[in-house]
Image (cartoon, rainbow, N blue to C red):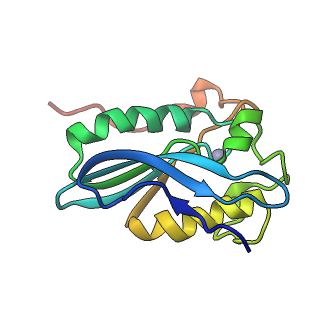
Amino acid sequence: MGEEPHLTFDLDKPGTSKGHLIVPKGADCEALSLPVFSLNKGEGSRLLITGGCHGDELEGPIVARRLIEWLPLTHCGRAIVVPVLNPPAVQAGSRNTPVDGFNLNRVFPGRADGSVTERVADAISRLLLPMAETVFDLHSFGPKWDFPRKKSFTTTVPPPSN
Ligand SMILES: [Zn+2]
């Protein structure tokens, strides 16, 4: 086995910092470099926020990038944000990784000697999941899903009583 997955920066550095999570190359794909944002701001919850697990769900990466701007103003504790977990799938706009056909959301904890999707899961599992007590993995409908008609969303929540 060659290179180990690693971070290009110190997640424990106080304040905000940015770097990359390096997913080693394999027989099927060159090494991947996933942008990572880190916030260390005193005591508080330890969050990991990820988007782009499925490459055809672009709301996750968009929301994650907005959180990178918003979290330093509001969040206390630690937050790690990875806007795009699966760059090959996002570049292709496909749910699964085009290189190996795998669904990243189904291969955790991954394999260090596996295909590219399994190597991404392995890197996340080993380096980022242990840092968090709560994980928000942002998903959405994607282009193939139809919203139910508005009538289906009618709720029975009573109006405010003030
Ligand atoms: Zn999804």
Question: Taking 127 as reference, is 95 left or right?
Answer: right
Q: Quadrant of the N terminus?
A: bottom right
Decide if residue 102 is on the left or right side of residue 85: right
Whether residue 77 sits left or right of residue 18 in the image: it is left
Q: Is residue 6 above or below residue 30?
A: below
Identify the residue at the far top of this view.
Answer: 150
Answer with the quarter of the image where residue 125 lies.
Answer: bottom right
**Vertical placement of residue 81 versus 128, above or below:** above
All told, the count of numbered labels is: 0
Q: Position of residue 74 (x, y in %)?
A: 22, 41
- Is residue 85 among the parts visible in the rendering? no
Answer with left or right where residue 95 lies relative to residue 138: right
Residue shown at 54% from the left, 62% from the top: 6
Identify which residue is drawn at 39% across, 64% down.
Answer: 132
Residue at 64% over, 36% down: 57
Quadrant that contains the C terminus: top left
Residue at the far bottom in the pictured view: 1
Q: Residue at x 34, y 46 (%)?
A: 17
| Nearest the eye: 148 or 131 | 131
The quarter of the displayed image where residue 107 is located: bottom right
* x, y percent for residue 148: 66, 31
Residue 105 visible somewhere in the drawing:
yes
Residue sitting at the far left: 162
| Residue 51 in the image, given as x and y percentages of width and height | 55, 44
